[in-house]
Amino acid sequence: MEDNKKIDKRYDFVLFFDVQDGNPNGDPDAGNLPRVDAETGMGLVTDVCLKRKVRNYVQLTKFKDGIPENGYDIYIKEKAVLGRAHVTAFNDLKIALGQESRAEISDSKLVDLLEEWSLPEGLIIDEDDTGKKYLVVAADVDKTAVKTYIKESKPSKEIKDFINKIMKDAKSRKPKGDEVEKGRDWMCKNFFDVRTFGAVMSLKSAPNCGQVRGPIQFTFARSVEPVVALEHSITRMAVATEAEAEKQSGDNRTMGRKFTIPYGIYRSHGFISAHLAAQTGFSKDDLDLFWKALKEMFEHDHSAARGLMSTRNIIVFEHNTALGNKPANELFGRVDCKRTTKGPARQFSDYEVQLDGKKLDENFKIVNV
C-alpha cells in the first residue's frame, strides 16, 4: 500500500439511524420480534446486522455483472461457500494443497451415467491421448460437501460407490505456518470485508487462512428511548395448495403476523484502529467507501418488513495520532440526542442531535480531537 493511502490516525464515531413502522432487526429466537432489552425496553440492532448492510452496499457499488472490482470481493455473502475462497487463494499463490486421486472409468455405462449427472465441485472427468476416461478428485476437495451433494442428488449406486472409493485416496495437505500467512494476506488483499471487519478463516473443511482482526468494529445499536413492538394481523388472499383451497371452499385466505416499531432512533458506536488497518491493508480509499456505505446503506435496503429506515447523523472523532488523544467514552459523552417534543415520538424532528450541547445541523461531521 502506498504511504499516502495508509490510515495513520485513530477514529471513533457515533452513528444515528431511525426506523418508522418497521422491524430494524428481527430476533429469530423470538418469532422475529424486534430485538429489545428486556429490562429497559430499549430497542437493539446487532453489530452483525450493521456490518451486513455495509457488505451489501459494497457488493452493490463494486460488483458489475456479479464480478467484483479488484480487491473488493465480499467473503461473507449470501449463499457463499467460504472454503472455495480459501482454495482459490492457495491456487493463486501456487501453493500445493495435497495429492489428487484419479481412477479409470472402464465401464462405458458408468461414463454415460457420470456425464449425465452433474458432478460436484472438485470432481472432473479427464481424458488422455488414448481416449481413456478418468474420474479425477482434486486434492483440496471438500469431502463433506461432496457427500452432502450425493445424499441430496441421489445418484445411482454405481456412481455413489465409485466416487466414495476414489475420494479415499485424495489427500489434502495442511498449509505450513508461512503459507497460512500468505493465504491470510491474500484474503485481506482481495476481500473488502476481511480487511475491514476481520474474519476467522481457520475452517476444518478448507485450507487454513488464519484469523484476521479487523480495524473497524461496531457496538450493538441501542434506541435512545424505549420502543414499543406492535403486532399486526395480515391477510393473504391466496393459499399455497389445492388442499387448502378445498378446505376453505374457495375463500382462499391466509392469516399472518407482522411486527413493527412505530418509531425509534438508534445509536451505535464504532472504532477504527490505525494499527490493525496497517496489518490488514485497510486504506484511505477503503475508509472513504466505508463512510459512504454508512450514509447510504439504508437507501438500498428497503423492504416491507423494515419500513422506513434512514441514516440520520454520523459524528466522527479524528485523532491526531494512531494511538489517539482521548478515551472513546469521553468523546462519545460529547454527543447527545434529546427530545424536543412531548408524548410518543413518531418522527426524527421529535429529537435533536447535539454535539457539546449545541444542535448538530450536519449529517456527517468530522471533529478533530
Image (tube, rainbow, N blue to C red):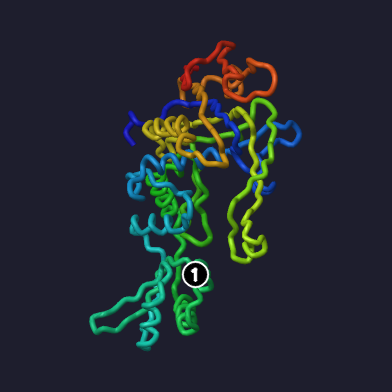
Q: Residue at x 38, y 55 (%)?
A: 89
User: Residue 48: in sight, yes or no?
Assistant: no
The location of residue 66, given as percent across then percent down, is 36, 50
Asked if residue 113 can be seen in this view, the reply is yes
**Can you say whether 91 is above or below 29 in the image?**
below
Q: Position of residue 94 (x, y in %)?
A: 33, 59
Secondary structure of residue under mark 1: helix
Q: Nearer the viewer, residue 186 or 229?
A: 229
Q: In the rendered view of the protein, which quadrant contains the N terminus?
A: top left
Count of numbered circles on the image: 1
Q: Quadrant of residue 307?
A: top right
Outermost residue on the left side: it is: 129
Q: How far from the left and from the top, in percent, is residue 163?
A: 45, 78
Q: Position of residue 60 (x, y in %)?
A: 40, 42
Instruction: Identify which residue is drawn at 48% across, 49% down.
Output: 76
- Residue sitting nearer the eye, 34 or 73: 34
Q: Is residue 337 above or below residue 118?
A: above
| Residue to which mark 1 is pinned | 149
| Residue at image coords 38%, 46% | 190
Q: Residues within 10 Å of mark 1 (few under 14, many from 20)?
A: some
Circle 1: residue type = Tyr
Q: Is residue 323 left or right of residue 234?
A: left
Q: Residue furthest right?
A: 39
Above or below, 324 relative to 279: above
Q: From the viewer's perspective, is residue 289 above or below residue 174? A: above
